[in-house]
């Protein structure tokens, strides 16, 4: 049977609406009242819903009554939401017998859906019910003391076994979900919280009970023995069939016996193979524990070394988008100083000979008239160092910058040879330790007062 033969076609529209968060909260309020009241009065629900809607924005739907917009009070909002639930098939409105009191009646499929939404919203791990022990104890009690109730015990065993398989598979895939959360997680605090808070709660409330007090391995053999004994007892099986017919569940004795045998076979088959599921859960639990602890240990130790910090910085740069990469690169340029390192080995003294042909060109003449003598050069060097010191270069660039963070030479005019030399030397010494400024080359050149200078941008470090 098709799902939409049971529920209205627009049933799920409230969960995809622009007001979906308000609708879900309103349904959770209805689900809460349903737990405590058999008949939910219209006035009580509207009053509680009006209080829930306080300080919240509800936008009119296309098919809402437009006249309600003029007097848009909390009560009118609540009425519109309740009417929306009626239109989409979540609830019906009826009058109680013998009175004029209107009550809200949720439909059967709506109750199941509200329970599902509540379970999805609930983040706390549920306590595990002792399904294995409950199956064993009910079968044992019926076998030894209450054979008249053996039919109920067999049906309870089948229902508990189906629920047990569901719980085990949910636990298995839940552990896989925690393993996926570890991948790509670099925050140590988040990893610790996931492992010692969330996963520990899952292990304490579900995994450990299955392994200890409700151990599958402890009760699977006794359960199978009882059910095999029931199948071998013809008189008991006949009584069980009569009991099934007495509660009018089946049309004939043959149908009742067939369904009872099928239920017993199902439980026997599950407890024959359920050990494999438990083993897979054990493997997944061990894998998660090792992966989580190793990841936490790596994250805590890697950050304590220079290599770990450098790797983290490069990883952050690689994962950043184009807008943030420039900022990260600027931080790295200011903080991380990279030096070239070389070494000397046995091959370092050998150099491949490059063959070349010597031409017959005339030798260059040495002009000694304009050359400085050695003594003149020695006297000139200190004055040049003082005249074009790094401090003076910094002052020159900061003068060009003024109040700006950066300046382009395309916007600068050179008035003298002094400024031209300072600009060239600043280009060479930009980025040195203590310079206080940096330079970035650009395309093109500029001519100013008979000087041709390349276009580049100077900025503060």
Image (cartoon, grey):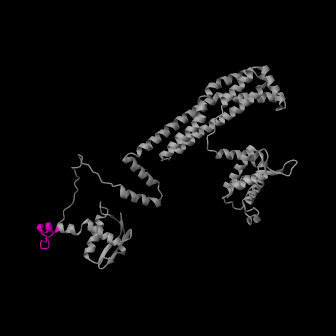
376 to 155, vertically: above or below: below
Residue 376 is covered by the magenta coloring: yes
Q: Determine the residue positioned at 31% across, 73% down.
A: 453
Q: Is residue 89 visible?
A: no
In which quadrant of the rendered image does the C terminus lie? bottom left
At a point 65% along the width and 46% down the height, the residue shown is: 120
Residue 327 place in picture, x, y as percent: 43, 60
Instruction: Count how many numbered circles sit on residues in the image.
Output: 0
On the image, the x and y values in percent for residue 214 come to: 63, 29
Give the residues in magenta.
361-380
Residue nearest the viewer, comparing 345 with 250 = 250
Q: Is residue 393 visible?
A: yes
For this orientation, the residue located farthest to the right is: 98
- Which part of the image, by quadrant, shows the N terminus? top right
Mainly helix, strand or loop, the magenta region? loop
- Is 36 left, or right, of 186 in this rendering? right
- Residue 14: percent from left, percent from top: 71, 54
Q: Nearer the viewer, residue 320 or 30?
A: 30
* Magenta span includes 127: no
Q: Could you tell me residue 329's position as x and y percent? A: 40, 58
Q: Residue at position x 74%, y 54% from top? A: 47
**Quarter-wise, where is residue 442 in the image?**
bottom left
Q: Nearer the viewer, residue 53 or 389?
A: 53
């Amino acid at each position: 049977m098709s799902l939409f033969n049971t529920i209205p076609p627009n049933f799920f529209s409230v969960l995809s609406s622009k007001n979906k968060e308000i609708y879900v909260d309103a349904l959770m309020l209805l689900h809460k009242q349903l737990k405590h009241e058999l008949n939910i009065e219209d006035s009580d629900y509207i009053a509680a819903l009006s209080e829930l809607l306080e300080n919240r924005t509800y936008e009119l739907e296309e098919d809402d009554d437009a006249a309600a917009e003029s007097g848009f009070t909390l009560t009118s909002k609540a009425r519109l939401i309740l009417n929306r639930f009626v239109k989409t098939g979540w609830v019906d409105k009826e009058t109680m017998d013998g009175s004029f009191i209107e009550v809200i009646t949720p439909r059967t499929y709506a109750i199941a859906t509200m329970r599902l939404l509540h379970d999805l919203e609930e983040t706390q791990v549920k306590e595990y019910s002792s399904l294995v022990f409950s199956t064993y104890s009910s079968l044992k009690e019926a076998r030894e003391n209450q054979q008249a109730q053996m039919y109920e015990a067999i049906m309870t065993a089948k229902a508990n076994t189906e629920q047990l398989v569901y719980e085990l598979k949910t636990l298995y895939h839940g552990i896989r979900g925690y393993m996926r959360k570890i991948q790509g997680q670099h925050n140590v605090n988040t990893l610790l919280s996931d492992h010692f808070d969330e996963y520990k709660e899952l292990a304490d409330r579900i995994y450990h009970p299955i392994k200890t007090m409700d151990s599958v391995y402890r009760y699977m053999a006794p359960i199978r023995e009882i059910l095999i004994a029931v199948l071998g007892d013809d008189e008991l099986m006949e009584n069980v069939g009569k009991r099934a017919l007495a509660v009018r569940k089946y049309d004939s004795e043959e149908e009742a016996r067939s369904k009872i045998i099928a239920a017993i076979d199902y439980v026997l088959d599950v407890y024959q193979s359920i050990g494999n599921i438990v083993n897979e859960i054990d493997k997944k639990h061990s894998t998660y524990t090792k992966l989580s602890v190793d990841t936490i240990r790596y994250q805590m130790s890697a950050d304590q070394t220079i290599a770990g910090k450098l790797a983290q910085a490069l990883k952050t740069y690689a994962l950043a988008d184009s807008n943030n990469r420039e900022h990260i690169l600027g931080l790295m340029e200011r903080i991380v100083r990279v030096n070239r390192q070389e070494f000397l080995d046995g091959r370092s003294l050998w150099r491949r000979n490059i063959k070349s042909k010597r031409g017959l060109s005339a030798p260059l003449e040495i002009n000694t008239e304009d050359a400085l003598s050695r003594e003149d050069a020695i006297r000139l060097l200190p004055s040049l160092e003082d005249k074009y010191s790094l401090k003076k270069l910094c002052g020159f660039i900061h003068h060009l910058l003024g109040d700006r963070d950066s300046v382009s030479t395309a916007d600068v005019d050179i008035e003298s040879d002094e400024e031209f030399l300072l600009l060239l030397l600043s280009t060479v010494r930009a980025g040195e330790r203590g310079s206080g400024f940096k330079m970035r080359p650009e395309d093109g050149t500029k001519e100013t007062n008979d000087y041709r200078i390349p276009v580049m941008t100077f900025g503060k470090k």
